[in-house]
Image: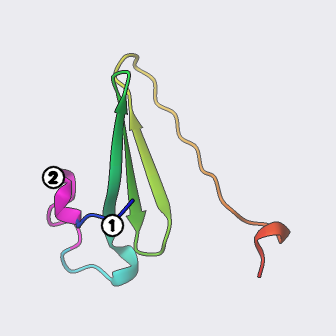
Amino acid sequence: MSESPTAAHPALAGLNDGVAETARVTFVDHHEEGGARVERFRLGNGLTVILWEDHRSPVFAYQTWLKVGSRHER
């Protein structure tokens, strides 16, 4: 999977203008399955954001997963 320029996603056009390098957003890839669209973005600080849109029901869910703890320490 290779990272595409931000311009590859219309919603990100102009988003990175004048922002710090660590605040930049990069569109990585997308996948569609069963009426749902899954998009992956990478923030300038390395955080991966996954957006899963599914308009079959009026539900909103939010989850945060962090790789932290003694297992991930260097």
Identity of the residue drawn at 53% across and 40% down: 62
Please state the horizontal and vertical placement of residue 53, each as a whole percent of the image. 37, 33
Identity of the residue drawn at 82% across and 67% down: 71
Identity of the residue drawn at 40% across and 16% down: 57
Residue type beneath disc 1: Val
Q: Secondary structure at mark 1?
A: strand
Q: Is residue 4 above or below residue 35?
A: below
Q: Is residue 66 left or right of residue 54?
A: right
In magenta, the rendered stretch is 6-16
Name the quarter where the N terminus is drawn: bottom left
Identity of the residue drawn at 35% across and 64% down: 2
Disc nearer the start of the sequence (1/2): 2
Q: Is residue 41 above or below residue 20?
A: above
Which quadrant holds residue 26? bottom left
Query: Rounded to the nearest whole Å, what is the CA distance between mark 1 and mark 2?
Result: 12 Å
Name the quarter where the C terminus is drawn: bottom right
* Residue 9 is one of the magenta-drawn residues: yes
Which quadrant holds residue 16? bottom left
Disc 2 designates what residue?
Answer: 10
Residue type beneath disc 2: Pro
Please state the horizontal and vertical placement of residue 50, each as a whole percent of the image. 45, 48
Q: Is residue 51 left or right of residue 68?
A: left
